[in-house]
Amino acid sequence: MGKLSNILCASLALTFLTPELSYGQKPARKLFGHKPLPAALKPAAHGFYTKGCLAGAVAIPVDGPNWQSMRLSRNRRWGHPKLISMIEQLSYKAKEDGWNGLLVGDISQPRGGPMLTGHRSHQMGLDADLWLTQMPNKRMTYQERENTSAISVLKKGSIYVDQSRWTRAHTMLLYHAASFPEIERVLVNPGIKKQLCDNVKGNRKWLHKIRPTWGHHYHFHLRMACPSGSPNCKKQNATPRKTGCNDGSLDWWFNVKLAPKKKPAKPKKKKPRRELTVSDLPRACTFVLSANAPSLEAATHKSIAAAFVAPEIKLPKFSAARVLQGKAIEASGTPVSSLNAAANYILNGNVPVPTPRPGVR
Ligand SMILES: [Zn+2]
């Protein structure tokens, strides 16, 4: 009896002290993807953008004066508090320059980590996808946020921006995004980078943060540097100091990467990537996984515009199955802009001004 209880005690203590043993080699995306709420710990990003997790995340509210969160079923409104407050500030700055408001796409899961679907990055709460389509004049319903799509800014069938769609407000939105000192990268399609390189006059310094990459013509991607208080966060290489407009790096996209192929390339068999397990992640992530959760209300970012009230949206209970069935933002469903015609909630310029106003740096 004594022996048995000793063994029992020892194994209990082991599971208690080292939660990673109980997570074993399970796919990290399944463990992180099933957590409906964040870890009630001090905010900290652990690991790397493509291999990490997040403690102390906060959610951006479903609605703000100048933004609406999209694809709510995915439960990816979570980020490091500094990133969330930056998105809020960006929404005001962009508004002043004619952008009707942000449509906020995926940020991170409540505890970060690899996602159930899509994205390799977005694991530390330091990445956010913002649609390249303005917020409509209407407060969208839950269903509309699930089903309406963004609009590509590229000309159909082309690798260049459609000049009839691109506005000064698009340029200013990206300018303001890149102007936060904490934002290290703004990822966009090469066509968008070219648009800026060709047209931005005067101050062009910020263009070095605008980084061309695949996709990203329905949305752009904000990436924040490792925040203070996150010693476990691994820095990404610094971006080159020059604009990246004339050094050949952008030409390479158009002349090599995106150039029409003479012979259609044989589809290469891609070796499936090995799935990340909890033991691939920083050790702190096991504690992030096992920590207690605050209530949704307590973990929602307190907006600077506290007086703002939007029509309430009832969020269904989080379900991983719903995430797996969810739609990407690309060209699925009717375009958001079609909602303007059916507006039932017009902002008509009466957006409450927050006190204190967000600092302009
Ligand atoms: Zn992204």
Image (tube, rainbow, N blue to C red):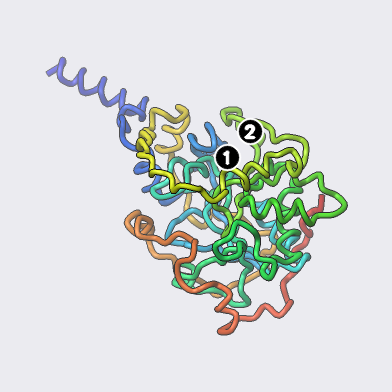
Q: Which residue is mark 1?
A: 43
Judging depth in this view, the residue of 145 and 2 nearest the camera is 145
Provide residue 207's location: percent of width, then percent of height: 75, 46
Residue 342 picture quarter:
bottom right
Q: Give the class, few, some or many, for how many residues have Cα within 10 Å of label 2's Cα (few <14, many ≥20).
A: few
Judging depth in this view, the residue of 280 and 288 nearest the camera is 280
Residue 10 appearing in the image: yes
Q: Is residue 143 left or right of residue 239?
A: left
Q: Is residue 26 left or right of residue 126?
A: left
Q: Residue furthest left?
A: 1
Q: Is residue 192 left or right of residue 277?
A: right
Q: Amino acid at mark 1?
A: Pro
Residue at figure coordinates x 54%, y 51% from the top left: 260
Q: Secondary structure at mark 2?
A: loop
Q: Is residue 150 above or below residue 159?
A: below
Provide residue 89's location: percent of width, then percent of height: 71, 56
Q: Give the class, few, some or many, for how many residues have Cα within 10 Å of label 1's Cα (few <14, many ≥20).
A: many
All told, the count of numbered labels is: 2
| Label 2, label 1: how far apart the Cα atoms are | 8 Å
Q: Amino acid at mark 2?
A: Gly
First of labels 2, 1 by sequence position: 1
Q: Is mark 2 within 8 Å of ligand 1?
A: no
Q: Quadrant of the N terminus?
A: top left
Q: Residue furthest top?
A: 3
Q: Is residue 93 left or right of residue 261?
A: right
Residue at figure coordinates x 54%, y 37% from the top left: 49
Give residue 229's mark. Answer: 2
Provide residue 348's location: percent of width, then percent of height: 71, 80
Q: Is mark 1 within 8 Å of ligand 1?
A: no
Q: Are marks 2 and 1 in contact (CB under 8 Å)?
A: yes
